[in-house]
Image (cartoon, helix red, strand yellow):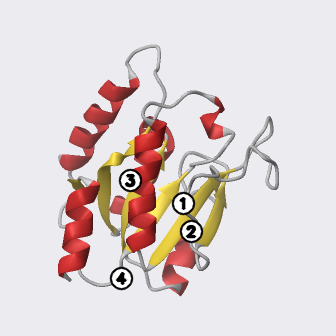
């Protein structure tokens, strides 16, 4: 990815992690690698009643997550970070049309935001080893993560493919540019 190194981090919040998520430590460590190497970091935070109210401990980002001083923050109330939020305005204001995506929950907020962003023409690279979710009744979290990596890798958005790469590859590409 040439140009700005932008990372979008979805729902890495205390309240979201009240439900056990697979490989939390590894996921956070990889996200921290990305946020420390990025020029711009956008944190997407979910707000709703029942523990994720803005300003609450549940709404706060995980304490082990690296938050650069110049980070940008967008609050959402739906799985889709574009739905009735300031995300599109923030992207436009900062001239961002491409980003690396990571975060929680793979099968809900990450997936919905990625698909909406790609459909809007944004260039998205998914960090295949920097997103997590919980076990679900129909599938284990690791199966869901593998499944969605494959779904995104083969997503049909003519002229705007979604890339799915390990964090190590993304960082190597950033260093080369």
Residue at x-position 41% and y-position 74%:
38
Left or right side of 13 for 170: left
Quarter of the picture holding the N terminus:
bottom left
Q: Earlier in the sequence, mark 4 or mark 1?
A: 4
Q: Quadrant of residue 160?
A: bottom left
Q: At numbered mark 1, what does the secondary structure look like: helix, strand or loop?
A: loop
Q: Determine whether 136 is above or below 127 in the image.
A: above
Question: 80 or 53, which lies in front?
Answer: 53
> x, y percentage for residue 24?
48, 38
Question: Which is more foreground, mark 3 or mark 1?
Answer: 3
Q: Which mark is residue 87?
A: 2
Q: Earlier in the sequence, mark 2 or mark 3?
A: 3
Q: Earlier in the sequence, mark 1 or mark 2?
A: 1
Q: Which mark is residue 4?
A: 4
Residue at x-position 36% and y-position 77%:
5
Disc 2 to disc 4, how far (Cα)?
17 Å
Q: Which mark is residue 82?
A: 1
Tell me the residue that label 3 is attached to: 30
> x, y percentage for residue 37?
38, 72
User: Disc 3, disc 1: CB below 8 Å?
Assistant: no
Question: Which is more foreground, mark 2 or mark 3?
Answer: 3
Disc 3 to disc 1, how far (Cα)?
24 Å
Q: Earlier in the sequence, mark 4 or mark 3?
A: 4
User: Disc 4, disc 1: CB below 8 Å?
Assistant: no
Left or right side of 151 for 106: right
User: Disc 1, disc 2: CB below 8 Å?
Assistant: yes
Disc 2 to disc 3, how far (Cα)?
23 Å
Q: Earlier in the sequence, mark 2 or mark 4?
A: 4
Disc 4 to disc 3, how far (Cα)?
19 Å
């Amino acid at each position: 990815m040439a140009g700005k190194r932008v990372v979008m981090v979805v729902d890495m919040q205390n309240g979201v992690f009240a439900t056990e998520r697979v490989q939390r430590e590894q996921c956070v460590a990889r996200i921290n690698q990305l946020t420390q190497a990025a020029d711009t970091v956008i944190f997407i935070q979910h707000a709703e009643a029942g523990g994720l109210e803005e300003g609450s401990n549940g709404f706060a980002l995980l304490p082990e997550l690296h938050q650069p001083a110049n980070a940008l923050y967008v609050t959402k109330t739906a799985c889709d970070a574009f739905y009735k939020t300031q995300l599109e305005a923030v992207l436009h204001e900062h001239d961002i049309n491409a980003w690396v995506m990571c975060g929680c929950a793979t099968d809900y907020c990450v997936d919905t935001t990625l698909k909406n962003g790609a459909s809007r023409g944004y260039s998205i690279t998914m960090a295949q080893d920097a997103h997590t979710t919980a076990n679900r009744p129909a599938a284990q979290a690791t199966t869901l993560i593998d499944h969605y990596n494959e779904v995104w890798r083969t997503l049909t958005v003519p002229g705007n493919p979604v890339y799915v790469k390990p964090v190590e590859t993304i960082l190597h590409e950033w260093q080369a540019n």
